[in-house]
Amino acid sequence: MTRSPDHLKTVEQRLLWLSHWMIHNANHIRPKQDGIKVGGHQASSASMVSIMTALYFSVLRPEDRVAVKPHASPVFHAMQYLMGNMTREKMENFRGFSGVQSYPSRTKDVDDVDFSTGSVGLGVAITSFASITQDYVQAKSWGNDIPLGRMVSLIGDAELDEGNIYECLQEGWKNDLRNTWWIIDYNRQSLDGIVREGLFARVEKIFEAFGWDVVRVKYGQLQRAAFSEPGGDKLREWIDGCPNQLYSALTYMGGAVWRSRLMDDLGDQGDVTSLLERRSDSELAHLMENLGGNCVHTMADIFASIDHDRPVCFLAYTIKGWGTPIAGHKDNHGGLMTKAQMAEWQAHMGVKQGQEWDALATVEDVDGFEAFLERVPFFAKGTRRLSDKVMDVPAIEIAGDREISTQMGFGKILDALSKGDSELASRIVTTSPDVTGTTNLGPWVNRRKLFARTAQADTFRDHNIPSTAKWEFAPDGQHIELGIAEMNLFLLLGAAGLSHSLFGKRLIPIGTVYDPFVARGLDAMNYACYQDARFMIVGTPSGVTLAPEGGAHQSIGSPLIGMSQDGLAAFEPAFVDELAVIMEWAFDYMQRDGEGDPDERTWLRDETGGSVYLRLTTNPIEQPGKRVDDAFRQGAIDGAYWLRAPGPNCSVVLAYQGAVAPEAIAAAGMIGEHRRDVGVLAVTSADRLNAGWTAAQRARARGNTKARSHVETLLDNLPNSCSIVTVIDGHPATLSWLGAVAGHKTIPHGVEHFGQTGSITDLYEHFRLDRHSIVQSINALTDGYRTPHTERHSPAAS
């Protein structure tokens, strides 16, 4: 450990100044184009500065990973600037275009951000799952050489209102969580007011119930010294009993008011009076604001005292706005120092005019200070963003079943991988929120076991009780069991999907979830994608095709989620051979990290890679037979292919996505005798079709007149008079945009309202997804046209 008290204090004061000046510059000096407040969080940064100084410059090692609370972003960037890892240009452009971000971002900031934060609470919880992921990697033969680091979260006390924090505590307890520190900036102020009295006494019990050590850091060095003086015990009792609002208000009003109030409450006791009279007003204010979290030496000593790997929650008492003119004011959360306040504070901080951006402006022993910075362990190895090799993807064989669902096909594909010895299979880690068996992960888990750092036998198996599930836990297991909380699912997928960068060992995380409940974890899924985590999420079963389960389990808008989510390529294959092609491509796509231009063949950013979302179904449908042609394979990946190519006089194209394929195909057969050249477009990914189309339009607007997307190429030869009928077991907007590609009239079929229990036939007819309703829409295109009667429940043609 490297620690020099004098240099730690210097670092603290430098970070306090630079973080506040950066915010002030953005709001009061930098020219504004729109006149609105740029914002920033001076007070929330000030309360964290001593904690972050002690942490980063005293105890952390390069293998440790930190999630910085969103509103302490300016301190983090100031620290990187001090260490030479951030440019002045970026700092001057704080919250501006291409400047440092409002909140730390792995993908938008240039400095060494470990975890993006911004959606409060998620940056806290992901550290627990990162620690579990680290243990998972370290337990494997191919990962046992990684150094174990601490997963640290710097938390605003108001973040403890977020439910995902408490959900993850339970998962941590179940998975024997270790090497995790949560450091709470207990300034007792939030955006709208003061934190309720006694709240943390209850929160503390929750942490202890889940096996955490709780360390209260309430008093700084000055306060502890004062408590040892005559009368100090009475001062301590007064501090302990002072309400949060009063303490904040007295801090804002300053030393003279502190003296008056303390004299009123304690002044008739001679020893206390003497204690107060030995200090000037400014010294008294300094003493009363010297809470543990605002004392860099106290925090350094506390951190250094932890000599075990149990999870620890540090409750660090702080003053919001500590060390600044706005300290303690209840409105200071988003408040800013005025120009006058800043000028006065600048003089107080000893920063000369013109030296505001000088990283070492107030440093007296520059050589000694720079030598100290060079010895700080955390920064000694430079950037800590790791990488791992790209693994070859084995060929994926498809099931030969005549009738099979895509969900069952997914299980068979994973089972086939589990039987092999490919390196890719060894890096797959699966997880699910208590729906492992019902989402077809069972065969994979039976072969590859569940993960636990300590082996646990399957009691049912030991007692010879028949069961389809072998619930065996072992260090080499490749499935992580989760409780029924979708936020935890996506936080774990996010952490595991960053394993190559955090720990230098690539994982291929696959999570399964009931498709409608993707929405329950949507904030965490978006958060994982924002960090550029790489994972596969399988939403199944999907849509009203899950007929008997009722509306609560029937997804509607999830295809639109897949389309709109950045960093996520969404697919909804109808047939298992499509699924096999897509999964083989996806395992490679999840490992790509290129920054190249869009592929001019499709205008998709495939070189950058990303995560993948598969929307699958439980309904077995008749398969089309063996297909190996390149057009089919590439089309399935690019988003669509012609199942039945349109002829030159095509008047109707039926475009479908997912489970409704048999209905669309049957409808095409029903009208085939009366309408020539009918086309059937098999859409596997409305997301990728749409993304390529909009990208090609942007390219043409920029002067590349030859830019053509995959969907434009597919629809190129359709007559202008041709109509498109779209069908999906999901929101019709998913496909209704197809008509805009080349100006074709479009009739969308889909689901816009909650379903109910019933048979598939009942619900398809109710929502007009069945073949007869599709034909009715086609008939409506030509007045007076009728089709011959067909048995309503005839099997689908393929």
Image (tube, rainbow, N blue to C red):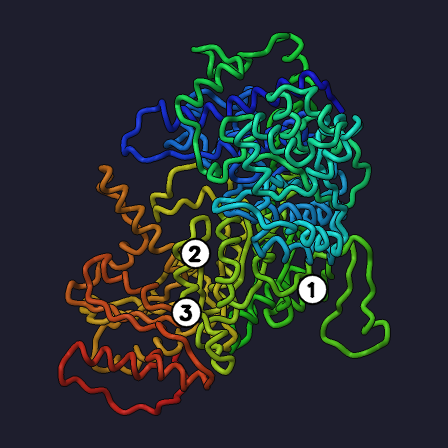
Mark 1 residue type: Val
The span from disc 3 to disc 1 (Cα, nearest Å) is 30 Å
Of residue 17 and residue 633, the one placed in the foreground of this image is: 17
Disc 1 target residue: 445
Q: Quadrant of residue 313?
A: top right
- Residue positioned most to the right: 463
Mark 2 residue type: Ile
Left or right: residue 480 versus residue 593 is: right
* Mark 3 element type: loop
Q: Is residue 642 above or below residue 786?
A: above
Of residue 751 and residue 399, the one placed in the foreground of this image is: 751
Image coords of residue 305 (percent x, y): 80, 33
Dot placed on the residue nearer the N-terminal end, 3 or 1? 1
- Residue positioned most to the front: 268
Q: Residues within 10 Å of mark 3 (few under 14, many from 20)?
A: many
* Residue found at x 52% / y 40%: 70
Dot placed on the residue nearer the N-terminal end, 3 or 2? 3
Tell me, for residue 637, which label it has, or none.
Answer: 2
* Residue found at x 65% / y 18%: 373
In this rendering, does residue 423 appear at all? no
Mark 3 residue type: Ile
Image coords of residue 452 (percent x, y): 76, 56
Q: Nearer the viewer, mark 1 or mark 2?
A: 1
Disc 3 target residue: 556
The span from disc 1 to disc 2 (Cα, nearest Å) is 28 Å
